[in-house]
Image (tube, grey):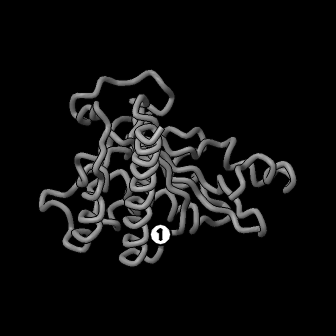
Amino acid sequence: VFDNLTKDLESQQYSSRFTAALEAAWSTLRRIEPDVPPVVLLVLSAREFSRRGHFTMEAWRKKYGPSLLHEVAVHPGMFESPEELLITVLHEAAHAILWESRKDGDKHCCGVSFRAYYHRKEFRSTARRLGLDVHFLNRRYGFCVTTWPTAGVPAKYRVVLEVLRGFTVVASNRLPSRESRRRPRNKYAGCPCSAHARWGLCASRMMSSSVAESAVPLI
């Protein structure tokens, strides 16, 4: 019984450390980039190999208040490479910033076309402002490929990298490199993140408040 309890506690510690490291990294990022909003951070299943992360706007709400929170999830296959993980974190942060700064008449949702494929110039501009290089993939997915510039990770993010080096458990299989990945068949194939910015979600603002609220988890 004691051995089982020890294993259970060890498992819980791994889980809590994942969350703690991600939350600490995001909090540090918000001090560096004040436009980055608060979010709920999750870890994707290690069996999920079609995406490196995702952003979903207003996916959570506080149980005793009207405040809505966004969701950002990342794949544990990047935990061995803090530099790769931070690229994805900043990629999703760019989507979050664009949602927070949205205006009536925008022709995009979080920097992505309403069909959820094409990363537009608005996303490119915001991601570049965060220090990433942004590359055009094709006419279907647009400016969705994010990397570090030739000079490497900007000095202002060194402290975030130190936080992301705190993972003691990593996925047994790493994600394939961006260069070697074969084109997946899922509908978010071209983007390393899978920003959930399709028209259906953007249109959720036109739903009645009771329906919209009942559709998201409580915290």
Closer to us: 162 or 36: 162
Q: Quadrant of the C terminus?
A: bottom right
Residue with the mark numbered 1: 36
Residue 107 sits above or below residue 155 on the image = above
Q: Does the image show residue 174? A: yes
**Label 1 Cα neighbours within 10 Å, binned few <14 / some 14-19 / many ≥20:** many
Q: Amino acid at mark 1?
A: Val
User: Does residue 35 appear to the left or right of 75 in the view shown?
Assistant: right
Residue 131 on image: x %, y %: 28, 65
Residue drawn at the location 37% of the way across and 59% of the way down: 90
Closer to us: 141 or 30: 30
Residue 141 on image: x %, y %: 43, 38
Secondary structure at numbered mark 1: loop
Q: Residue furthest left?
A: 151
Closer to us: 182 or 39: 39
Q: How many marks?
A: 1
User: Does residue 72 appear to the left or right of 181 in the view shown?
Assistant: right
Residue 92 sits above or below residue 52 on the image = below
Residue drawn at the location 52% of the way across and 69% of the way down: 37
Residue 121 on image: x %, y %: 42, 54
Residue drawn at the location 50% of the way across and 65% of the way down: 97
User: Which of the 4 quarters of the picture holds residue 133?
Assistant: bottom left
Residue 47 sits above or below residue 70 on the image = above
Residue drawn at the location 45% of the way across and 55% of the way down: 16
Residue 5 on image: x %, y %: 47, 43
Closer to us: 192 or 140: 192
Q: Residue furthest front?
A: 1
User: Does residue 178 appear to the left or right of 43 in the view shown?
Assistant: left
Q: Does the image show residue 124? A: no
